[in-house]
Image: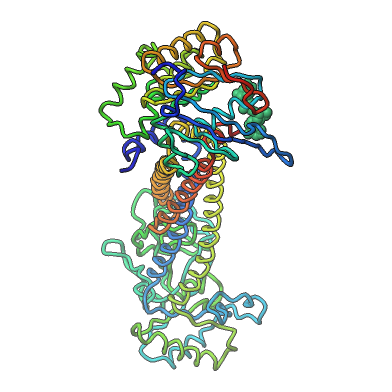
């Protein structure tokens, strides 16, 4: 399950077909993604790298259903999501995907535990087990003693771990992380990477992360290099 | 099933309200100011109207007044031309005799007035109005002293020019602070008069002349004090309510034998009341206008706060969407927040407005109305809710990433 080399179509979890994203800024158009096609398999650990402005974040937002492509199709578990309604997309974001942002995006003035529990508000998880789930998730990221701290009372690395716990709370199939270590020092960054390795190897979760650090990128089973909105090469 | 559950939504709304204290306070403040001022202003307008109605009820039923000059215009409002037309300023004894001769079954009371200082051995009351009339006036105007407080003057005392006065409650206290005024002497324009009665206390009046400050004496005595026997007003008592209209017609006919139609006015208290009420209505509309302005000001305040926090809120909406909130869940949460905030502010406003009305009522007539509460509460809550939900509605339509990046 953890081997990415088995590239038969049966376990393709995510597929992008001819994705193009253009931004209209004033009078001119800018093509951030140019006809990108991509397959990600169940259990893969994939890094995406490339120069600044190459379209990595744009790609991640489309994969994470946070943004719509201008053209092209996104298939999740073989299902085309472009025709889904807003509330169906919301449910996929809630249950199937876990997104980790470079800027953490935690709710201010809100405790770590509440931040971690936020996705459960929009899920079917019964109320009586939520608290316990949140605590377990905080234990998993080593922050059980910071449950009542607000983001302002946490270090950057701790905030990112809260954000990861939030991404994991609904037991998602795919974890998407856009420069999860971008705002962290090398030690906290290494911890986050170690954690991702565990999630991939022990729990078999599919992980896609963006980084501009080649050393980090190499830790993945597969690295996709993007330049000027196109996939340059894969290794 | 609603996801999140209503109780979850309620809880997150309350948390958000408590987390953003300054926003909560400023928003509520806008609503509180709007609601309080609307309630206070309408209470004052309403209280004024009630007060005037009561005062006119006190004037006595079935009373018809004959005044010099044209007081009312054809629309029932007060005439503005009375100063420019040839003016009659008073009536004469001949008019009195004429009316007495022509009108049957009615009591006609002449009223005159003198202005002078009143001295007692204890105090002096400067330039005071002394009203003169007849025996019947006391009963008709409900100013006959009650048992133990002396008596109203008789027609015999009037005929004999007996130097007697009846004092209002307050003026009696001023002139004779230590003991009862009855039986004591007062000096007016060098003449000594005996206090034969004190009218019962009638209570507060707002600034205008009050029975408590009045001084009454027989018509003949006041004529001497004034130096003439002019009659300022006739008060005519109709036999009953149904005969007011016909009596007025009769009076007018008699008066027209001697005077031009615009040299005198014949009116009853209900007519006067409706004229004054029309003035108060204009006043009330003006007050309501001011109240409306304060509602708008409060509303703009609410709007401002909501718009200031929209960036922060838009990011929050983006995050919530990114982790799986569907648009309706976000809208409901913001709606609940806005409703709680607005209703809280509205409620505090209603309480402050009511307390304020009670406070004002101790020195100025004010009376709260349900409609003003509903109006103030309704409008300000609507403003709060609209401006609380509209930005959220807009934000919930953005893609999560657009909302997260909103600036
Ligand atoms: N909302 C937008 N409107 C217009 N242009 C945009 C928008 N978002 C991104 N772009 C442009 O699209 C291009 C790709 O942006 P993107 O954020 O995907 O880059 P990136 O590869 O993530 O870069 P970095 O490594 O710096 O994060 C950039 O040139 C950027 O200017
Ligand atoms: Mg980026």
Residue A193 vertical position relative to residue B2 in the rendered view, above or below:
above
* Residue in view at x 53 percent, y 46 percent: B298
Residue A169 vertical position relative to residue A68 in the rendered view, above or below:
above
Q: Quadrant of ligand 2?
A: top right
Badge count: 0
Q: How is the image coloured?
A: rainbow
Residue A180 picture location, percent across and down: 52, 18
Residue B218 picture location, percent across and down: 43, 73
* Residue in view at x 43 percent, y 67 percent: B216
The quarter holding residue A131 reads top left
Q: Which residue is farthest front?
A: A8
Residue A74 picture location, percent across and down: 51, 35
B316 or B167: nearer the viewer: B316
Quadrant of the image for the N terminus of chain B? Answer: top left
B79 or B341: nearer the viewer: B341
Q: Which residue is farthest right?
A: A27
Quadrant of the image for the C terminus of chain B? Answer: top right
A127 or B112: nearer the viewer: A127
Residue B201 vertical position relative to residue B159 in the rendered view, above or below:
above
Residue A111 shows in this picture: no
Q: Which residue is farthest top?
A: A187
Residue B254 picture location, percent across and down: 50, 92
Residue A85 vertical position relative to residue B72 in the rendered view, above or below:
above
A41 or B392: nearer the viewer: A41
* Residue in view at x 32 percent, y 18 percent: A135
Residue A181 shows in this picture: yes
């Amino acid at each position: 399950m953890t081997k990415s080399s088995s590239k038969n179509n049966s376990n393709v979890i995510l597929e992008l077909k001819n994705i193009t994203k253009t931004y209209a800024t004033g009078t001119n158009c800018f093509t951030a993604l140019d006809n990108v096609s991509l397959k990600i398999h169940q259990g893969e650990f994939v890094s995406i790298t490339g120069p600044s402005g190459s379209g990595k974040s744009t790609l991640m937002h489309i994969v994470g259903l946070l943004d719509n492509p201008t053209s092209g199709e996104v298939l999740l578990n073989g299902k085309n999501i472009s025709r889904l309604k807003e509330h169906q997309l919301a449910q996929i974001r809630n249950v199937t995907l876990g997104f980790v942002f470079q800027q953490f995006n935690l709710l201010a003035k809100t405790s770590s535990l509440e931040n971690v529990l936020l996705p459960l508000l929009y899920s079917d998880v019964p109320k009586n087990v939520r608290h316990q789930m949140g605590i377990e998730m905080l234990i998993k990221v080593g922050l059980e003693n910071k449950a009542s701290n607000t983001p302002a009372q946490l270090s950057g690395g701790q905030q990112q771990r809260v954000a990861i716990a939030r991404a994991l709370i609904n037991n998602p199939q795919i974890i998407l992380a856009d420069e999860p270590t971008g705002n962290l020092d090398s030690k906290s960054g290494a911890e986050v990477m170690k954690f991702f390795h565990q999630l991939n190897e022990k729990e078999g979760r599919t992980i896609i992360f963006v980084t501009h650090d080649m050393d980090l990128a190499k830790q993945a089973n597969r690295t996709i290099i993007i330049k000027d909105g196109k996939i340059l090469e894969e290794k | 099933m609603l996801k999140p559950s209503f109780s979850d939504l309620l809880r997150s709304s309350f948390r958000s309200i408590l987390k953003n204290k300054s926003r909560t306070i400023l928003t509520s403040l806008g609503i509180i100011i709007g609601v309080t001022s609307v309630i206070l202003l309408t209470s004052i307008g309403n209280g004024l109207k009630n007060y005037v109605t009561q005062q006119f009820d006190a004037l006595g039923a079935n009373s018809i007044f004959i005044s010099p000059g044209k007081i009312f215009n054809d629309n029932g409002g007060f005439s503005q031309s009375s100063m420019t037309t040839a003016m009659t300023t008073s009536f004469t004894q001949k008019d009195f005799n004429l009316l007495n001769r022509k009108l049957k079954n009615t009591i006609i009371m002449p009223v005159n007035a003198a202005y002078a200082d009143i001295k007692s051995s204890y105090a002096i009351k400067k330039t005071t109005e002394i009203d003169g009339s007849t025996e019947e006036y006391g009963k008709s105007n409900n100013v006959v002293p009650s048992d133990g407080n002396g008596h109203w003057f008789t027609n015999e005392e009037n005929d004999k020019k007996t130097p007697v006065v009846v004092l209002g409650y307050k003026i009696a206290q001023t002139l004779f602070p230590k003991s009862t005024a009855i039986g004591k002497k007062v000096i007016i324009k060098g003449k000594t008069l005996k206090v034969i009665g004190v009218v019962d206390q009638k209570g507060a009046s707002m600034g205008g002349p009050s029975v408590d400050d009045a001084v009454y004496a027989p018509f003949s005595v006041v004529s001497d004090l004034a130096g003439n026997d002019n009659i300022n007003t006739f008060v005519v008592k109709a036999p009953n309510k149904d005969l007011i209209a016909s009596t007025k017609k009769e009076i007018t006919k008699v008066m027209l034998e001697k005077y031009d139609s615009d040299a005198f006015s014949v009116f009853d208290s209900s007519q006067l009341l409706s004229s004054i009420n029309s003035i108060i209505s204009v006043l009330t509309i003006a007050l309501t206008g001011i109240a409306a302005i304060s509602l708008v000001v409060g509303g703009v305040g609410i709007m401002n706060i909501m718009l200031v926090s929209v960036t922060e809120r838009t990011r929050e909406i983006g995050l919530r969407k990114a982790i799986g909130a569907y648009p309706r869940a976000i809208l409901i949460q913001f709606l609940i927040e806005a409703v709680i905030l607005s209703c809280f502010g509205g409620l505090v406003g209603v309480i402050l407005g009511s307390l304020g009305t009670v406070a004002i009522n101790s020195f100025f007539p004010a009376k709260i109305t349900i409609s003003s509460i509903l109006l103030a509460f309704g409008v300000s809550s609507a403003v709060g809710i609209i401006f609380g939900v509209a930005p959220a509605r807009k934000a919930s339509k953005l893609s999560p990433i657009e909302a997260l990046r909103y600036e």
